[in-house]
Every structure is written in C-alpha cells, then in structure tokens.
Image (tube, rainbow, N blue to C red):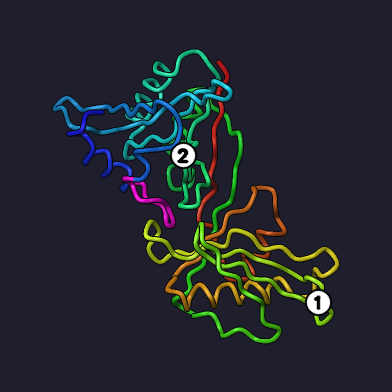
Amino acid sequence: MASVDEPAVLELIDADWLPGQQQAHELLTPAGESPHTLVVCDPHGEVVGAVLCQVRTEDDAGLIVWLHGREDFEVIAALIALARAQLGNRVLYACTGPATATGIPGLPAGHRPVTARALTAAGFTQASRQRYFLRDLTDVPPAPPTYPLADATDLARPAGWRLELTGTDGQPLASGTLLAPAPATADMAVLSQLTVQCGQRRHGIGSHLLAQCLHRAHTNGASHVTAVIPEGDTAAARFLASAAFLLLDTLTVYHRRP
C-alpha cells in the first residue's frame, strides 16, 4: 500500500463498520512485527480491496489480520491469494484483528457473508467463535438503581468502573466491569465482565447488578452497551437476551493448515 492509497483503504474499512468497532485509522497500525498492507486495484487503478497480514513471532503463524473488499467475492478471493503468497507455506489464521474496540477479534460473518464464503472456499475453517451483543439505552433508559447498591471503583486503563455487590454479612455476591465510552466508540460502553458467586445464582442478583451497570453507562453518556460471550455459553446468551441485549453478530476467527 502506498501512502496515496490510504484514504481508499480507510473507506473500505468504514464500509464494513460494525457498531462498537475501532476507528478505521487505528486498524492500519496493528501491534506486532512487520505488517504488510496489500491492495487490489481495478483496471482503472482504483483501490477496490485491501488486506493486512503479518507473521506472529512466537509461533511463526501467518496472520491475515483483516481484509476488506466491499463484499465482492472475486476481490476478497484475490486478497486472500495475495496474503497467502506473502505469508508463505505456514499455518494461517484469518480475521485476527480486533472486531471491537476492546480488542475482541473475528469476522462478523453475519454482516459479511461473502467474506466468510471466500475464506471457506480458500480452505479456511472456523477456529473460534464469539457472540457479540448490543443493548440500546435510548428507547427505554435504564431505571435508577435500587437497594442494595453496588460499590463502584473507578478504573484508569482502560477507563471504566468495577461494580461489586456484597451481602449484609460483607460476603461478595456479584461483580461486574463496565468500560466507559471512548473516542473510538463514541457513545458505546462495554460490559466486559459480570460474575455471580456460585451460591448466589438464580436469585436475580446478576440482573440486579446488570441494571446498575446499564444505568451507570447511560448516565455517563452511553447510548449503547456491547458485550461479547463465548459461542457455547447459552446461559450467558439467555441472560443478556432477558436484559434486552440483541445478538448483533458472531465474531469468527479462521484457521488453515499448509
């Protein structure tokens, strides 16, 4: 990629934007060694696709960090071929770049089915899947918290809060981590963790703490909250659905052996 190509590459990334995703310019400079951004152009010399790839030093695996081609199968297939030629005959992983601002990787396959199909056609299989949820706080703003109130501790890096519920005997009941809206996500807060102690489950404590997390997010400028859970965690999925979280997509990392 030449510097003159950068505006077109940023437009390609933005065309596939997912709520809660990092800003496009932040995806051009990933962590790691020797990233290569390769582009595909049409007969007129216009950039129609871009892929970023690199080799992971700890295990020598080749990474297709991200690829964007406006969901044109031929363009996506050409990007995959370029990346494979660049990375050589090694184990490959695709879509390892952050799909969310908190660094969760994967291809949002529901939003980008053509890219998913092109990866499968090139011999890639699914290596991991995580479900990505979104909660709108604007239609029905969260109600003010009720007793018992959670103790909130400010977090600095990343900015947010640690909320903890304790019983009258001082024993912990549940805890949650809420990340504050950041410039990269505008008005998006992130529910990054919520845990209820084993002996306290099925008593509404998790829902009680979640309601306080949502209220805190709303009063600190968030209009949406996102959450990511493992694909097989059906209990967490039901819990989020009961709190009006909608399944936005499934974030998939792909794998291919030489």
Which of the 4 image quarters holds residue 222? bottom left
- Within 10 Å of disc 1 (Cα), the crowding (few <14, some 14-19, many 20+) is few
Rendered view: 41 above or below 252? above
Residue sitting nearer the eye, 244 or 179: 179
Q: How many labels does the image show?
A: 2
Check the image and report above or below for 60 versus 15: above
- Residue at image point 56% right, 28% down: 255
Answer with the quarter of the image where residue 41 lies.
top left
* Residue stretch in magenta: 16-25
Q: What element carries label 1?
A: loop
Across and down, in percent, residue 53 comes to: 41, 28
Indicate yes or no whether the magenta region holds residue 17: yes
Residue that mark 2 sits on = 97
Which label belongs to residue 17? Answer: none
Could you tell me residue 30's position as x and y percent? 41, 37
Residue occupying the point 42% across, 57% down = 19
Residue 243 image point, x, y percent:
61, 71
**Amino acid type, residue under disc 2 in the picture:** Gly
Measured in 3D between alpha carbons, the distance from the residue under mark 1 to the one under mark 2, in whole angstroms, is 42 Å
Most foreground residue, 51 or 151: 151
Query: Mark 1 against mark 2, which lies toward the viewer?
Result: 1
Q: Mark 1 sits on what residue?
A: 170
Q: What residue type is labelled 1?
A: Gly
**Furthest-left residue in this view:** 44
